[in-house]
Structures are given as structure tokens and as C-alpha cells.
Image (cartoon, rainbow, N blue to C red):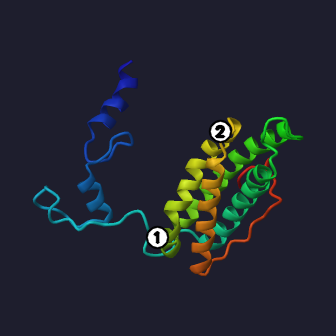
Amino acid sequence: MVVLLLPLVIIAGCGGGTHSGTAAPASTSAAQDGSLPADPSGNGADAAPIDESCPTSNTIAFAKTKFVLHSGLAFGAFHRYLYKPYQAGTFKKGASGRITAFVKGGLAALFIKREVRLASQDVKANPTLCKAIAAPLGKIGDTVQAAFDKLKSGDASGVTNVNSLVSSVEGTSKTDGVPITENDNPDLTSTPK
């Protein structure tokens, strides 16, 4: 029994290292990696504010290309499986193909959330896109499921709001030189790679 406890006592008694479950204070961990200047007063007055939400250079290879791919899939799925059936009245009670439209719409909502999450990661890796597109893109991911749930109860306002956000992101992206081409035939059952 003592033989089993001895390594634990030695490991626990060795100070100096960072334990994986223990977080260092923010000023200490930031100073160690060089992202913030040391604050000798400890009150944060000397530390320069840093915008950690957007990088100063690309942090992911081909971030713009990946963003265009994922957002094109998400926006194409939104328009094909939610917006166009909504415009055609397929989600209304008594409409032909309503149940199929809701099944595909629910699957599409999950697919869209995943693709928007992946696109958001790519946007946050590029300084130009991050500043202009991160917030509205994140909002699409947050609201698409709620919009679909509202649609089930007959309220289409969520779908029109998401469509406005999609148009805004597409317009801003095009202005920044990164046009998005919607893929209106996405494989909703594909798994991320």
C-alpha cells in the first residue's frame, strides 16, 4: 500500500508545475505566454487592453476558402429547405408535402447550425472577416433552430429574420472580396471532416 502511495505523494509534493485541472490566475498565465505585459501593481491598471476576439493575422490555413465552403453549404441548405418551402406555403397546415418539408427542415436546421459553427471558426481565424462578419454569422447559428421551431407553430418571422442575416453576411463578405456561392444541393447527412 505504501508503495502505491509513494508516487502520488511525490507528484503532489512537487510544486513548481502547473496542474492540469488548476487554472493559473489570468495575469500569471497571460504573462507566461507573452500576450500581456506584466502588471507589477496587480490591479490591472498597467495592462494594455487586448481584443482577443479577432486575430492580427491568419490563424488557420485557407480560412477564407473554408469560410466560403461552409457558409455556402449552410446558406444553400437554408434557402432550399427552409426559406423556399416557407415562401411556397409548404409549411402551412393542410399543404401538400408539409410533413416531408418539416422533416427535411429539421434536418437542415441542424446541418445549418453545424456549418455556421464551422464557418464561424474560420471567420475568427481571419482578421478581415472576423471584424465584419463574426457577429452576424454567429447570430445565424444561434437563431436558425429557434426560427424552425417558430415555423412549426405557424410563426414565419424567424425565417425572414434569418434570411435577412444571411443576406447581410453575403453582402458584407462580397464587399470584403470574399463572395459566397450558395450550394443549394448539400448532403444533409454528411459528417464533418
Picture coordinates of residue 35, whole percent (x, y)? 31, 66
Q: Quadrant of residue 84?
A: bottom right
Q: Which residue is mark 1?
A: 131
Q: Is residue 142 among what the camera can see?
A: yes
For the residue pair 18 and 118, the one nearer the viewer reads as: 118
Please state if 135 lies on the left or on the right of 6 as rendered: right
Please state if 130 lies on the left or on the right of 36 as rendered: right
Residue found at the far right of this picture: 96
For the residue pair 35 and 172, the one nearer the viewer reads as: 172
Q: Earlier along the polypeptide chain: callout 1 or callout 2?
A: 1
Quadrant where the image shows the N terminus? top left
Q: Which residue is mark 2?
A: 149
Cα–Cα gap, marks 1 and 2: 30 Å
Quadrant where the image shows the C terminus? bottom right
Please state if 33 lies on the left or on the right of 46 as rendered: right
Q: Quadrant of residue 52?
A: bottom left
In this rendering, the answer to whether 2 lies above or below 145 is above
Picture coordinates of residue 21, whole percent (x, y)? 38, 39
Q: Amino acid at mark 2?
A: Asp
